[in-house]
Image (tube, helix red, strand yellow):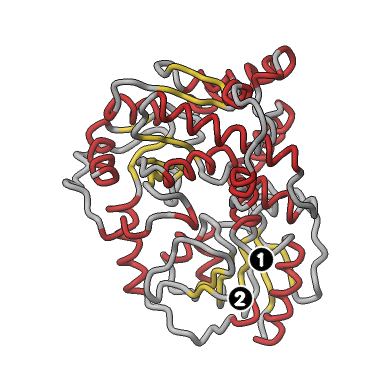
């Protein structure tokens, strides 16, 4: 994770700390860990790879697998599977030799992190998965099973020993100035590493970490802030369904939905909206620069999300973080991908074709769910701002 959170967790629960990283530059975030490169672990595995390990790699559910299948329309090659299998075999040996009894990782959709989870499950080793929080911008997810669609939703009913935050209110966000400064240092270091020492960088990573990519992302973010300062308002028409788009190369889109592109979602949902007598309002992800072909009754909208949701007849999304905003409303919500929001009649998980606005969705259950999400599931804190006592209580909940 691009923050000191893993360092802070290790300080509380561990005496010995080992980090297996996808590149040397991750050392920025793990200064007190003894670092081992993933490429070194892979290089330590010699000889023929057994068929069972290859099949385990083939059956993994990861971002890399989903990207190859949906975007590149292909299966993983024998070279890819063998590379992953070597990491699986090498990491399993590493964990055993170091007598590791807790593994922590960020985002379980990455293939090398999914392998770590697989090893933990096979050997009854505890693990924690981190991700940015569902209630933005001051919360973080730490889960002992997975994140997003793989989350341990039983944690919603497992209260912390003491949920009192002691008046702690984080000043940082995941995109705070200090977080951005450290990330810039990481990106620059990674660029140098890639230029001079490519053998230290793991293959098939989810992210190329190019300076150009993040320069463009920062520019878009600044443009978005300027637009908000100008109070840009785009209206939403009466009798409209609101579609909250995600990036169509996002892990939630590729791994936890049946769709191959946002264009497919737009076309199929517009057909359903026509049947329901609704127009289709589409809110793009802030980083989405793609162009889409809009049917006659579809249009783009933007502005305050809560207002758009309130004025819509229904809200539809695959698994956007904006689901929380929709749950704070009385507007019917339909999730057309797999998600962790399975809690009574808070919303409806369904296919596009089975969307039915007349189905009951209980506002009181929504409020109850959001209360549990905030109190029992999410960790208060973000970026470089975490409270040690709150973190300690959270770890007690997860590990005991």
Q: Answer yes or no: do the residues labelled 2 and 1 have beta carbons within 8 Å?
A: yes
Q: In the rendered view, does 213 fall on the left or right side of 182?
A: right
User: Residue 124: x and y, percent?
Assistant: 36, 44
Q: Can residue 348 be seen in this view?
A: yes
When the figure is inspected, residue 23 is found, relative to residue 89, above or below; the finding is above
Q: Mark 2 or 1 closer to N-term?
A: 1
User: Residue 17: x and y, percent?
Assistant: 37, 22
Which residue in the protein does label 2 denote? 351
Q: Is residue 138 visible?
A: no
- Looking at the rendered image, the disc whose residue lies closer to the viewer, 2 or 1, is 1
When the figure is inspected, residue 386 is found, relative to residue 239, above or below; the finding is above
User: Residue 132: x and y, percent?
Assistant: 47, 43
When the figure is inspected, residue 9 is found, relative to residue 298, above or below; the finding is above
Q: How crowded is mark 2: few (under 14 residues within 10 Å), some or many (20 or more)?
A: some
Q: How many marks?
A: 2
User: Residue 105: x and y, percent?
Assistant: 46, 36
Which residue in the protein does label 1 denote? 258
Point 33% across, 52% down: residue: 377
Dot 2: what SS? loop
Point 48% across, 85% down: residue: 359
Dot 1: what SS? loop
> For residue 138, which numbered disc appears in the image?
none
Closer-to-camera residue (327/153)? 153
Closer-to-camera residue (24/3)? 24
Point 33% across, 72% down: residue: 365
In the rendered image, the quadrant that contains the C terminus is top left
- Furthest residue in direction top, as rendered: 196
Q: In the rendered view, does 185 fall on the left or right side of 174?
A: right
Point 81% across, 75% down: residue: 296
Disc 2 to disc 1, C-alpha distance: 9 Å
């Amino acid at each position: 994770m691009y923050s000191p959170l893993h360092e802070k967790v290790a300080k509380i629960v561990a005496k010995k700390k080992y980090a297996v990283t996808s590149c040397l530059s991750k050392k920025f975030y793990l200064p007190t860990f003894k670092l081992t490169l993933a490429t070194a672990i892979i290089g330590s595995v010699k000889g023929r790879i057994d068929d069972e390990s290859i099949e385990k790699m083939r059956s993994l559910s990861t971002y890399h697998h989903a990207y190859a299948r949906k975007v590149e329309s292909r299966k993983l090659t024998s070279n890819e599977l063998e590379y992953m299998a070597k990491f699986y075999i090498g990491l399993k040996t590493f964990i055993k030799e170091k007598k590791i009894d807790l593994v922590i990782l960020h985002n379980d959709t990455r293939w090398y992190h999914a392998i770590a989870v697989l090893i933990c499950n096979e050997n009854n080793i505890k693990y924690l998965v981190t991700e940015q929080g569902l209630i933005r911008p001051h919360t973080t997810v730490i889960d002992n099973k997975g994140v997003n669609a793989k989350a341990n939703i039983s944690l919603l009913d497992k209260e912390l020993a003491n949920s009192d935050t002691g008046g702690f209110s984080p000043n940082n966000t995941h995109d705070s100035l200090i977080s951005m400064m450290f990330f810039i240092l990481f990106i620059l270091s990674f660029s140098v590493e890639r230029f001079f020492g490519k053998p230290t960088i793991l293959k098939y990573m989810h992210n190329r970490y190019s300076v150009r990519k993040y320069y463009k992302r920062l520019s878009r973010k600044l443009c978005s802030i300027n637009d908000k300062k100008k109070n840009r308002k785009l209206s939403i028409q009466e009798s409209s369904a609101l579609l909250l788009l995600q990036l169509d190369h996002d892990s939630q889109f590729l791994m936890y939905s049946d769709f191959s592109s946002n264009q497919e979602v737009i076309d199929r949902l517009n057909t359903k909206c026509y049947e329901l007598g609704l127009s289709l309002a589409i809110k793009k992800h802030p980083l989405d620069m793609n162009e889409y072909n809009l049917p006659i009754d579809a249009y783009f909208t933007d502005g305050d999300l809560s207002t758009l949701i309130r004025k819509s007849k229904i809200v539809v999304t695959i698994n956007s973080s904006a689901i929380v905003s929709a749950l704070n409303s009385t507007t019917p919500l339909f999730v057309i991908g797999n998600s962790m929001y399975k809690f009574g009649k808070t919303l409806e998980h369904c296919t596009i074709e089975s969307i039915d606005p007349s189905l009951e969705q209980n506002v009181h259950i929504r409020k109850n769910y959001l209360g549990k999400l905030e109190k029992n599931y999410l960790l208060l804190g973000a970026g470089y701002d975490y409270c040690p006592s709150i973190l300690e209580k959270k770890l007690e909940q997860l590990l005991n």
